[in-house]
Image (cartoon, rainbow, N blue to C red):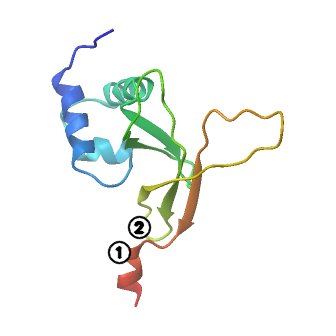
Amino acid sequence: MKRRNTPQKQAILNLFETCSSAYNQDAIEKQLYGKMDRATIYRILKRFCEDGILHKVLGDDGIAYYAKCKSCEHENHQHNHFHFQCEDCNELTCLKEEVNLNLPEGYEMKNYNCVITGICPKCKQTIK
């Protein structure tokens, strides 16, 4: 089913096209200040996750972050990669390398979400 593209949806898509890290809802609201309300942003993020446009990652801080999917489709929405969250700037990024996990016999993996915490290269330079 083809969904209608609204100016609000396009504004959120444009935001994710220009970023290299994941955004939480508060950061999205700050970037789009005055263009739409919190409930509209939430509904669009939820729909984009369902449609394979974005994926949601629960950060080490307990906050949901959203990142643009690279090769997902509505029927095939998988994210078999790790995420890195900087303990200094709190930025959460998708790591490009896919990881294959071997589960014990009898277990069937659908998807996994792993967040590695530490210091990102940008913050590491400012610490030196």
Residue extending furthest toward the left: 7
Q: Secondary structure at mark 1?
A: helix
Callouts 2 and 1 close, C-beta under 8 Å: yes
Residue 1, placed above or below residue 32? above
Looking at the rendered structure, the kind of residue marked 1 is Lys
Binning the other alpha carbons within 10 Å of mark 2 as few (below 14), some (14 to 19) or many (20 upward) gives few
Residue 26, placed above or below residue 47? below
Q: Quadrant of residue 66?
A: top left
Mark 2 and mark 1: Cα distance apart in space: 9 Å
Q: Is residue 33 visible?
A: no
- Report which residue position mark 1 lands on: 122
Of the 4 image quadrants, the one containing the C terminus is bottom left
Exactly how many numbered labels are in the figure? 2
Q: Secondary structure at mark 2?
A: loop
Binning the other alpha carbons within 10 Å of mark 1 as few (below 14), some (14 to 19) or many (20 upward) gives few
Q: Which residue is found at the position 27% from the left and 43% from the top?
A: 16
Q: Which residue is found at the position 40% from the left and 26% from the top?
A: 73
Q: Earlier in the sequence, mark 2 or mark 1?
A: 2
Of the 4 image quadrants, the one containing the N terminus is top left
Residue 91 in percent (x, y) is at 41, 60
Residue 56 in percent (x, y) is at 48, 39
Residue 87 in percent (x, y) is at 50, 68
Q: Which residue is found at the position 29% from the left and 41% from the top?
A: 29
Q: Quadrant of residue 42?
A: top left
Q: Which residue is found at the position 56% from the left and 65% from the top?
A: 117
Residue 89: mark in rendering: 2
Looking at the rendered structure, the kind of residue marked 2 is Cys
Residue 23 in percent (x, y) is at 37, 48
Q: Quadrant of residue 111?
A: top right
Q: Is residue 55 visible?
A: yes
